[in-house]
Amino acid sequence: MPGQFDMAWHALQILLAWPRIAILFLGVLIGLAIGCMPGLGGVVALAVLIPFTYNLDAPTSFALLLGVAAVTTTSDLIPAVLFGVPGTVGAAATTIDGHQMARQGMAGRAFGAGFVAAAVGGLFGALVLALAVPLLQPVMLAIGSPELLAFSIFGLSMVATLSGRAPLKGLTAAGLGLMISMIGSGTQTGTLRWTFNWLYLFDGVPLIPVTLGLFALPELADLAINRKSIAGNNAGSVKLSSQWEGVRDVFRNWWLVLRCSALGTALGVVPGIGSAVIDWIVYGYALRTEKNPERFGQGDVRGVIAPESSNNAKEGGHLVPTIAFGIPAGASMTLLLGAFLLHGLTPGPDMLTKNLDVTYSIIWSLTLAHILGTLICLVGARQLARFAEMRHQVLLPLIMPIVLVATFQATRSWGDLYFLLMFGSLGWIMKRFSWPRPPMVLGFVLGPIFERYLFLSLQIYGARWVYRPVVIAIAALIVWALYRPLTDTVKRLAQQVTPLSRAHLKLKPRAWFTLTLIAVIVGALITSSDWPPIEQIVPRTACWAALIVAVLNLITEVFGADQATAALTPHGPAPEPMSLPAAIAVKRAVEFLLWLIGLVALAALIGFIPAIAVFVFIYMGFGFKEKLPRSAVFAAAMGVFCWVVFDRGLSVPWPQAVLGDWLPALRDSTGLM
């Protein structure tokens, strides 16, 4: 043990030497900037930076890379709170309460709570990494496909909790998410499932268009409809003191922070359980175990503290299997594993013996990056909170192009943008009718994991996989998670459904929406009937489950009490009573969608960067009647920003535009068309 302490102290001295500490600081700044840009995340930054570490020594390289990877999950809180746009898929749960806090004028408090909770979680994960790497080998060896399958089922069981008082809607949404995740080539025979011979869908629907469509566009659409700043009439109450109130919230809820940090670290250790899944599991756990759960989704600071503490804690957990066994626990860890090999390092026993100094430098890099990132965010939180006061005339034209570029990063195909628009429209309708959106994302994320480990478990263990001790323990947790929500649902159905003889058969808009979903599910069942039986198991099971609960939900909507305002769900409160007539709200929503479609069409015509500058000018100057010189300044600044960051910095390969086909010389000289 003394030798371990000596090596840890030696690694800290190496890291603090110049220029390594400066490179770590640079990595933190890059990571914070990337985290603020919705949809990009640490994976993009790591992919870009790894080639630049070729001529650096190992401690310096990992100082840069971990400086980036550690803090993207800290700064993704910023767009999640201010715009309701998850900076990364791991911040989706944070948007639920964080954005509600910003709308209530408490953005500073959300920042203070989120940044400090993230720091505590990150330090907790780093501590676990330092203590547990030599001890976890037998645990890792005991985890097989049955355990991973049980974890995915446990994640799905969170649907009932995440749906609050609308479990039937939540279960339907989760079933639809599972169905969407099955689109693409089948895992067993390669059968094309629901692709309609569209090449883009052969590899499935990417996650980024789904998450940004369901969470980002509905919030931006409401901003365009209500035409107020994010904080509305409460903008003036965003003060520096509220930031420190958020810091105090973390210490008042210290037990929740520690529990969620521990859960995030433990789930991070398990390969295949990614950020998007951990985020929702921890949020559902907090909702299930905390007092007054009905406050979640209404701007409760605990809804920020829980997912943010687990988000950073999981990074330490992810590094355990990556360093000790060469098993990457996620996409970013896969890239980091490539960096190991690039520098001649072999994960496994060597990292715990002859390369122990590198291992400890990684741990120190992770620790210091969390501290630096939190301090920078806290110092700048007052300025960041001012975004909540920006007028919609300025904010919308600037944010909409970034969301589109971030979406395009998914597969760099036009299909990404088409699905963004489709899921954005769906997300706005779901929000209007009080349908919980998190269950759909959770079902979408867990679908491939569930299918893969189901077949592996059956092939290797047969039916015996259900008798493994860890599986039995997780099954008990699933029963615990499902018992209260389902029993409450049965009681409410018995109370709310009126006799048929007294029912007034008048289909309201929300019932028509449910009927549309039922028609889609039935169509999916019909079109999947000729697939090979082995490829039908999970997709058709999801279809039938979604169909049954959707029909039950339709019955409650037609014959039961009006649940439009009763859906107190953690995806956000029921829609606020519209101060605008419904016709005007719908008209403005359609206008917002048309502006988005116009931006996509303009990008196809003249190229992304020129289209962004032109769009900002037209939208501000003519859509919102801003002064034309002011609009021109913002348009030029936005065009330069996107060119520097996305074209020069991230080397985004822009798709060919029509103008470039007409003028090849212009395309060759600019590279933007």
Image: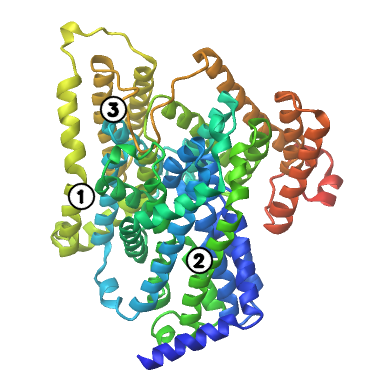
User: For residue 622, which quarter of the picture?
Assistant: top right
Farthest residue toward the bottom?
3
Quadrant hosting residue 509: top left
- Per the image, label 1 sits on a secondary structure element best described as helix
**Three-letter amino acid code of the residue under disc 1:** Ile
Q: Amino acid at mark 2?
A: His
Q: CA distance from mark 1 to mark 2?
A: 33 Å
Image marks 3 and 2: residues in contact by CB distance under 8 Å: no
- Number of the front mark, 3 or 2: 2
Q: Residue at x 30, y 22 (%)?
A: 563
Category of crowding for the residue at label 1, using alpha-carbon neighbours closer than 10 angstroms: few (below 14), some (14–19), many (at least 20): some
Looking at the picture, how far across and down is residue 139, in whole percent? 26, 72
Can you say which quadrant of the picture contains the C terminus?
A: top right
Q: Which residue is mark 1?
A: 478
Q: How many marks?
A: 3
Left or right: 424 with respect to 672?
left
Closer to the camera, 102 or 511? Answer: 102
Q: Earlier in the sequence, mark 3 or mark 1?
A: 1
Label 3 belongs to which residue? 550
Q: Would you place residue 230 above or below residue 578 in this image? A: below
Residue 543: in sight, yes or no?
A: no
Relative side of 623 to 259, left or right: right
Numbered badge on residue 370: 2
Q: Nearer the viewer, residue 48 or 11?
A: 11
Front residue (pair 153, 542): 153
Q: From the viewer's perspective, is 601 left or right of 142? A: right
Please, what secondary structure does the residue beneath circle 2 have? helix
